[in-house]
Amino acid sequence: MTLHAELAAVTDRVIEASKERRKAYLELIRRERENGVDRPRLGCANLAHGYAGTDEQRDQMKDSRRMNVGIVTAYNDMLSAHATYYRYPEQMKVWALQAGITAQVAGGVPAMCDGVTQGYPGMELSLFSRDTIALSTAVALSHGMFEGAALLGICDKIVPGLLMGALRFGHLPMVMIPGGPMRSGLPNKEKARVRELYAEGKASREELLEAEIAAYHGKGTCTFYGTANSNQMMMEAMGLHVPGAAFANPGTKLRQELTREAVQRLAQIGWEGDDYRPVGEVVDERAIVNAAVVLLATGGSTNHLIHLPAIARSAGIVLDWEDFDRLSKVVPLITRVYPNGSADVNMFEDAGGPPFVIRELTKAGLLHNDILTIAEKGFAAYGTKPAIEDDKLVWNELPEKSGDDAVVRTVDNPFWHEGGFRILAGNLGRACIKISAVEEDRWIIEAPARVFSDQQAVQDAFKAGELDRDVVVVVRFQGPKANGMPELHKLTPPLGVLQNRGFRVALVTDGRMSGASGKVPCAIHTSPEAKGGGPLGKVRDGDIIRVDAVAGTLEAKVPAAEWDARELAPAPAEAMGTGREIFALMRHGANEAEQGASALLAESGL
Ligand SMILES: O=C(O)C(=O)C[C@H](O)[C@H](O)COP(=O)(O)O
Ligand code: SF4
């Protein structure tokens, strides 16, 4: 299989940009492997402390040098997706003993649900909960008690946070263990319709709550293709899951056997054996490029334009928006899953799912098929589908055609010839826009600005009828340094209503949107952010703003002399309450969205 020339060129660009960092990173993990803290180097008292909590398996731990697996779990009941992890550690310890190794819960990490915090102050902690997870992961693994790790995490910031922390222990073999999506409920498009009715005052709160509960009705990830489910697609393409583990539903025999296999694979890829696969070598430049490719091919969440660069930097790899922009021009869109279509993630799985996407892109030379992965059979295994046959876990080849041409297609018959991500640049800064879910006649919006500094004011203006016109809604001071870069997804229904009324509408912000956002053109992650002097601070009500996803421009049509002379609007005072004040250190130290929006990375020089 010949690599697509642009994939090879972008990969070379990433390798070149990463050269010094990656070299230092690989030296670090070699040193950690050879001289780092591990059980043989721990003192007796240290070891006794480390064994005491799981005294029931102390004999096996004392005798076995094959591996003690540290389980880092993001279990909580607040995330429907993570509630499924409740009894995973208990079961994994049994499977570990059966595989001749041991396992302990090394630590728990916090896991926010963006669906619960959406539109509320808690959302201003969301992005930095990712970095908090990275810190918590490092605390768990810092004990030197482990020769491998199992990472239990699924949702938006949790997979990125786990990897950012875990990759700093890149000498350890690790497996990401997902829990799967909830079964299909109320279709996402119907949920969105009831929301718009409610936004217009045409549905009651009771009707809206009934629709929302019918959509989000049980354990597992939500069924839209948002940030959480985009995580799973990327983990497959990086080879960090057991092949095809992404979307088996919770509570099924298949889910159970995929998790058992993850424990068994850890036992086989440790440094004592002849198949040592440290996570810092599994995650290399090619694996990172693979993740970007599948994100683009599936219309994945724009949040990964921030998280994937952050994950990459944690492994000494530099990925930027130019890499995404270049890949987007050659990677076809081959899935239509909500918000990029009406199907949900269960229908995606049934139609072929991640294995189908990976096989198709590999055939087209658009994925590196020689990455290390954690799978015994290497990357080719990720193009096959797991199943239970005769009570055994097997992997089967996929049919040529997908199970549903309206949901997944072959590369030679894509929904669109490119990935639907664009960079925008101009006198308002550098921003991202995803157009895979936006009607083509809305890829260019030029209209007068209405400027806000918080999303509630937008809701109030909408309710007061002040936005019933062609309008570019500018919501500034939403960047990482300002208020933690919240998702502004609550604006999707009102902006969608304005669009349905026939107005030409766009959103421009230094904040983020959700992976579930879609049909309204949004220029997001605008950098440099308004807080600290970014040009969004100069925009005034009535300025004509042009968002042009075709030309790749983002401009305020104001004469240059006037624009240069304008004063910057003052930033709002930093908020108190809901714990936001204790995240000030993460806001103040955060770097730009394109570098990962992280004080951790900025301060550690990563
Ligand atoms: O993909 C992501 O980024 C998510 O995690 C979910 C979103 O942030 C939404 O908040 C949850 O979807 P809604 O029910 O439409 O609010
Ligand atoms: S997918 Fe998003 S909204 Fe759903 S449980 Fe996970 S974090 Fe919450």
Image (spheres, rainbow, N blue to C red):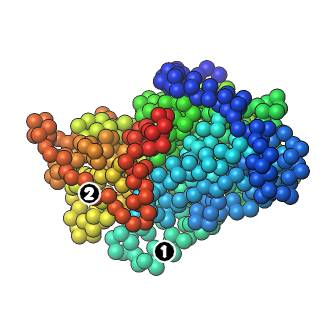
Question: Quarter of the image holding residue 234?
Answer: top right
In percent of width and height, residue 6 lies at 50, 23
Is ligand 1 within 8 Å of the beta carbon of the residue shown at mark 2?
no
In percent of width and height, residue 74 lies at 63, 56
In percent of width and height, residue 180 lies at 66, 55
In percent of width and height, residue 540 lies at 17, 51
Q: Quadrant of ligand 2?
A: bottom right
Question: What residue do we see at 49% from left, 59% from top?
Answer: 114
Q: CA distance from mark 2 to mark 1?
A: 33 Å
Amino acid marked by disc 1: Leu
Residue 220 circle label: none
Question: What residue do we see at 36% from left, 69% from top?
Answer: 199
Residue situated in front as seen by the camera: 64 or 3:
64
**Residue 214 can be seen in this image:** yes
* Residue denoted by label 2: 572
Does 512 appear above or below 552? below
Is ligand 1 within 8 Å of the beta carbon of the residue shown at mark 1?
no
- Pointer 2 local density, CA inside 10 Å: few below 14, some 14–19, many at least 20: few
Which mark is first along the chain, 1 or 2?
Answer: 1
Q: Is residue 195 left or right of residue 533?
A: right
Q: Are marks 2 and 1 in contact (CB under 8 Å)?
A: no
* Residue denoted by label 1: 209
Quadrant occupied by the N terminus = top right
Does 25 appear above or below 444? above
Q: Is residue 320 left or right of residue 349?
A: left
Callout 2: helix, strand or loop?
Answer: loop
